[in-house]
Image (cartoon, helix red, strand yellow):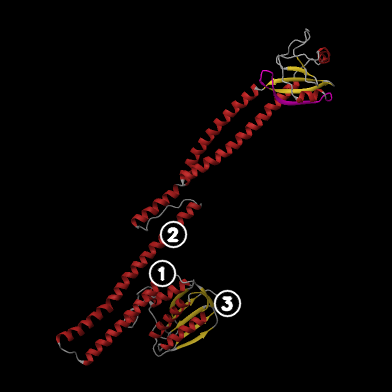
Amino acid sequence: MRSRLTLLVAAAVAIAVAVSAVGCWYFVQRELSWQLNQSLRDIRVPWKLMDKAVKDCSPNPVTTPADEDYLPFPEPMQIVFPDGTRCVMGNTAVKVTHREKKIAGGYRGQEEVYDGHADNGRPIRVLVKNVDQNAAFVIARPLNELRGTLRRVSVMLVIVAALGVLAAATAGLLVSRAALRPVGRLTRAVEHIAQTEDLTTRIPVEGSDEIARLSASFNAMTAALAGSRVRQQQLVADAGHELRTPLTTLRTNIDLLLRSEQTGRSLDPGAKERLLVNVKAQFAELTTLVGDLLQLARGDTDHEPHVELPLHEVVTAAVERARLRGAEVSTELSPWYVVGSAASLERAVLNLIDNAAKFSPGRAVEVVLHEGTLTVRDHGPGIAEDELPHVFERFWRSPSARSLPGSGLGLAIVAQAAAEAEGVVSLDNADGGGTIATMKLPGGPQAAG
């Protein structure tokens, strides 16, 4: 990237310098050409001799008339007649072209400037001007000096352009190094993370430009990944701890049954039935725990497409499932539409109802949905104030609930579902006894579609 940036800067400066050099050369050439033309017009010529020269020149002269009045001029100079004959008055003769013939036969004062050649082939700038109805005055100056000056200017412009491009490339390299230094730090940090998997690496954020924003975003990404790794490790550790108890109980009961069969000493039918019932209960608990773990893991990694859905219908479906499980539920629901996952929200509402029914057996659970606020209240013993901050933690269970069935993941699933729908959930002690769970979800009383 540094090389490409340096090359781009050098190329841009080279193009700009080249355009400037060509423009400079063009304007210098025009100015020098204009000055040369003006110098031809400013040459002092004894015009009083023009009429005499026209009269004295024979029809076919090629040299200056033998007269002391016609001393050779230092400039190429001559008189041309319409038929192409000429009278040379300067130190060099100029080749006659159709221009001289045309102007010689034209009107007095008519003139033209062009690049021509002397008889010896030297390039010259020619001024042709009509001085009589039948003659044209021709004066010229060599182009060697003009062309030499333009060559020197061209060489100087090429040298200046080359130095400019070299300076631009050097400046571009320095600028690219300074500009890409944060990118280099970011690259080294990414390579370090790729090699060591150290997500605690941070990049210093300086300023508020795009590189600083990129660094801040990278730091936020690594922080999120580190947090996800910590949560994953905590989930695995907690899951291993929670799975150990039912697995140990299952192994113990199955060992007892196998030992009874292997030793030939049959267990008492009542004891054997109790063992089988316990095994079945442990399998049910293990199944529930694994299902909850899969739900939490799916929420951390899979993001189902969220659509607009009627929350009141989702709550109704959860209530019907709770009633099939034997829970007594009273409802008061008003329409409310949210954007989220129907399966996740239904599971969350069902967990709230199951949790409330578990702590208030024989009493109805009150479910109310009003203006996007869902409340689930039980009439149980409530919960200690110092335990309220922990109720939504994974695998956390209050001392009074450890003897009851459950995995300690139900409320954690509720919190996750509420967060996915951009809502919040809380649990408090209700006035008059029991607890009340409150889940607030953004939305509206009517479908946006």
In the image, taking residue 128 as reference, residue 17 lies left or right, namely left
Observer-nearest of 116 and 85: 85
Give the magenta part as a residue range: 106-123
Residue for badge 3 = 447
Instruction: Tell me the residue at 81%/25% (across/down).
Output: 110
In the image, taking residue 429 as reference, residue 370 lies left or right, namely right
Q: Which badge, 2 or 3, is on the more N-terminal residue?
A: 2
Q: Secondary structure at mark 2?
A: helix
Q: Are marks 2 and 3 in contact (CB under 8 Å)?
A: no
Q: What is the number of the mark on residue 311?
A: none
Expressed as whole percent of the image width and height from the top left, the position of residue 98 reads 76, 25
Expressed as whole percent of the image width and height from the top left, the position of residue 165 reads 53, 36
Total tally of numbered discs in the picture: 3
Which residue type does callout 1 highlight? Asp
Q: Quadrant of the C terminus?
A: bottom right
Residue for badge 2 = 220
Q: What is the number of the mark on residue 300?
A: 1
Which residue type does callout 3 highlight? Ala
Observer-nearest of 181 and 9: 9
The residue carrying pointer 1 sits among few (fewer than 14), some (14 to 19) or many (20 or more) residues within 10 Å by Cα, namely few
Which residue type does callout 2 highlight? Ala
Q: Secondary structure at mark 1?
A: helix
- Whether residue 364 appears in magenta in the rendering, the answer is no
